[in-house]
């Protein structure tokens, strides 16, 4: 009887984690470049009440519940939203932008959020002031900033009649992007699980292209998350019911001596 209590309690804990994951997905439905997460589970050890033999083809095993095994990041692409802002860029396909802190460029971060702005020095930076790595500053009072599908930046300097070619932004891919560590602020960090970042020009090898004037929306599908939330809620309710039923059965067993 006690085994049922602990198994049901592990189910409640598992569904609580599931709800936490679903809630975070829904909270970030409007976060640019956000990739939804999925909680995954595995069953716990089994008690062998009877082993299967040549004469007895089926054994008897009773499980002890469930536990979380991982929270997997689903790296499918989100839809592209037209902003019309020339410094907004989206990745159509695989790849991440790399940004660095000007005060500490030894720790690069990676992101799919391409909502960049020009700072006072002409660098392309994100909302927290992290610079797009490897991109030279655009001279002040330049106009007609253009970023083509291959990442080539051009602009017309003040007083000039023709465009000047600037830096070429790079995209980075990983052997296992699901292994990247989330750091908040739409930033990801390389880990041993993700493998080494491989940089290169957009539209080369397996890297996607650049789309200027667009931002990548979250890949969260609200309807799917709502269905998953209802399923998690029902599974949680069933686990609480199992605990209540086990408690009632134990109570009835305790009254047998009376």
Image (cartoon, rainbow, N blue to C red):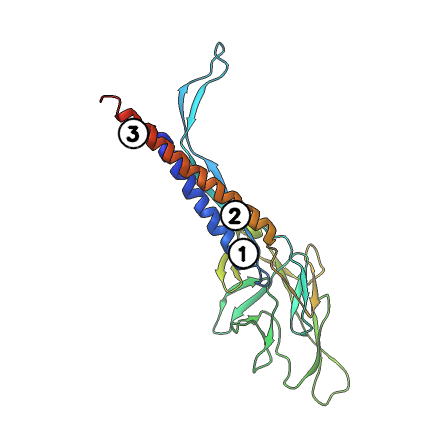
Sequence-first tag of 1 and 2: 1
Pick the front one: 28 or 242: 242
User: What is the spatial separation of the Cα atoms under label 1 and label 3, in whole angstroms?
Assistant: 41 Å
What residue is shown at x 65% (from left), y 74% (from top)? 87
The answer for how far apart the CA atoms under marks 2 and 3 are is 33 Å
Q: Residue lying at the far top in this picture: please name it.
A: 55
Residue at point 46%, 44% (across, down): 15
Q: N-terminal of the two: label 1 or label 3? A: 1
Going 42% across and 26% down the picture, which residue do you hit? 62
Image quarter (top left, top right, bottom left or bottom right) of the C terminus: top left
Q: Neighbour class for label 3 at 10 Å: few (<14), some, many (≥20)?
A: few
Residue ID for mark 3: 251
User: What residue is shown at x 61% (from left), y 61% (from top)?
Assistant: 96
Q: Secondary structure at mark 1?
A: helix
Tag in front: 2 or 3: 3
> Where is residue 27 drawn, in percent x and y?
52, 59
Tell me if residue 245 comes above or below residue 138 in the rendering. above
């Amino acid at each position: 009887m006690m085994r049922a209590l602990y198994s049901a309690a592990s189910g409640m804990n598992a569904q609580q984690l599931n709800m936490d994951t679903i809630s975070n997905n829904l909270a970030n439905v409007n976060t640019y470049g956000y990739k939804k997460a999925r909680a995954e589970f595995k069953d716990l050890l089994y008690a062998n009440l009877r082993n299967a033999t040549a004469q007895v083809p089926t054994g008897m095993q009773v499980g002890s519940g469930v536990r979380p095994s991982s929270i997997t990041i689903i790296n499918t692409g989100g839809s592209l939203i037209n902003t019309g802002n020339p410094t907004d860029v989206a990745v159509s396909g695989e790849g991440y932008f790399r940004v660095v802190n000007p005060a500490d460029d030894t720790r690069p971060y990676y992101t799919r959020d391409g909502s960049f702005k020009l700072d006072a020095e002409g660098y392309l930076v994100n909302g927290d002031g992290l610079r797009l790595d490897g991109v030279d500053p655009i001279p002040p009072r330049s106009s007609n900033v253009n970023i083509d599908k291959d990442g080539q930046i051009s602009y017309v300097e003040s007083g000039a009649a023709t465009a000047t070619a600037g830096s070429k932004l790079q995209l980075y891919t990983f052997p296992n992007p699901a292994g990247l560590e989330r750091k908040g602020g739409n930033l990801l960090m390389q880990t041993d699980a993700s493998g080494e970042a491989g940089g290169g020009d957009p539209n080369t090898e397996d890297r996607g292209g650049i789309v200027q004037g667009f931002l990548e929306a979250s890949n969260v599908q609200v309807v799917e998350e709502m269905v998953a939330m209802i399923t998690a809620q029902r599974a949680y309710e069933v686990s609480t019911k199992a605990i209540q039923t086990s408690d009632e059965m134990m109570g009835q067993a305790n009254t047998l001596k009376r």
